[in-house]
Amino acid sequence: MQDPERIHAILDEAPVCHVGFTVDGQPFVIPTLHGRRGDRLYLHGAKASRLLKHAAAGLPLCVTATLVDGLVLARSVFHHSMNYRSVVLFGTGRQLESDGEKLEALAAISDHLLPGRWNDARLPTRKELDATSVIEVKIDEATAKMRTGGPKDDEADYALPHWAGVLPLRTVAGPPEPDPLRKADVPLPSYLGSR
Amino acid sequence: MQDPERIHAILDEAPVCHVGFTVDGQPFVIPTLHGRRGDRLYLHGAKASRLLKHAAAGLPLCVTATLVDGLVLARSVFHHSMNYRSVVLFGTGRQLESDGEKLEALAAISDHLLPGRWNDARLPTRKELDATSVIEVKIDEATAKMRTGGPKDDEADYALPHWAGVLPLRTVAGPPEPDPLRKADVPLPSYLGSR
């Protein structure tokens, strides 16, 4: 696998991934949360969900994570593009069975969502853990692709009177919105404090 | 199809979609730009690309567009979630052949990227148009899913001393970055002016 560090960094930065699987020749692409520890990607969900059932059965998966970094405006329509970073990963799922493995993977998914949160929330009960399917996918057949930088126009087009450059895009967090149903005022935790 | 207006709005707001297709039982999920006019979704790319070849062949596709709106922090790990809006669309591609159809679809993709840009860029040459594959997918078998609002905890958990609520997420544009290779200063066009 080329450049595992870059692949891991993209997987870690993307808030969601898109998981592809095939049922009777029909592809499905489902967005879902994920987590990573080392060279293992983790997915989770209700045991009854089609995605989780399929992933647990060990059938071929494709997991894609994409970060959109900007619109690239060239002078020609043809050379318009997008700056992005993406990972496309092929593999099969393995359903985790032991409580220890499942909890570690769920902690990885929680850490990915928001580092520090796992230790500041009620951990799963027996019943909740049993209702949750956790899937491990080994990150071995994966490729990262990216585009960075400004537009690449044909030489003759640089003289055209069209603005060219990049409109950068990024995902930002707004101010945390406390649950209106809260019964006590809990101070904003430090892992949300700098927002 | 349920709620076409909501489906169209999600497709229009998502900067990219993820297209799933299957080759010899192996699913592929590829991020790409798209555009929409009415109940037609448009994809484009180089004729040589695997995605475009596959889409042009009329094999089953799944096109998924996802907007991540926020992290939902419940008091229990189990009820953590994400606010999102997504569309999952099943269909087959039809390769557009006439220049008129292709240009209209490319204009839709350009409008989706940045309204107003199509009329402020050099349009495709004969050679560029011939090198571009444009695919139409009818939006008839599509579903929108979404989650909004705060966490839903188990009744007993509301008394726990964990912060709960939503961390809103959104995609924002930064200041436009002019091409360092520009030969003349072109004023920022109005469609970028309010950024």
Image: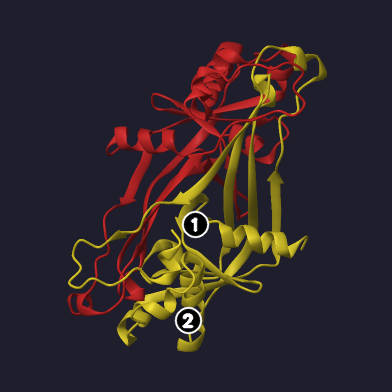
Chain colours: A yellow, B red
Whether residue B154 sits left or right of residue A78 in the image: it is left
Identify residue type, mark 2. Answer: Lys
Estimate how packed mark 1 is, as few (under 14), some (14 to 19) or many (20 or more) residues with alpha carbons within 10 Å.
many
User: Badge 2 is on which residue?
Assistant: A102
User: Badge 1 is on which residue?
Assistant: A16
Mark 2–mark 1 contact, CB under 8 Å?
Answer: no
Residue at x-position 71% and y-position 56%? A143
Is residue B91 at least partly visible in the picture? yes
Chain bearing tag 2 is: A
The residue closer to the viewer here, B18 or A16, is A16
> What is the quadrant of residue B1 in the picture?
top left
Q: Is disc 2 in the same subunit as disc 1?
A: yes
Is residue A61 at least partly visible in the picture? no
Answer above or below: position of B156 versus B188. Answer: below
Q: CA distance from mark 2 to mark 1?
A: 19 Å
Residue at x-position 37% and y-position 51%? B84
Q: Circle 2 sits in a helix, a strand or a loop, which is it?
A: helix
Q: Circle 1 sits in a helix, a strand or a loop, which is it?
A: loop
State which tag comes first along the sequence, 2 or 1: 1
The residue closer to the viewer here, A174 or A52, is A174
Whether residue B34 sits left or right of residue B83 in the image: it is right
Answer above or below: position of B100 versus A20. Answer: above
Residue at x-position 61% and y-position 17%? B187
Chain bearing tag 1 is: A
Residue B156 appears at what percent x and percent y? Answer: 19, 80
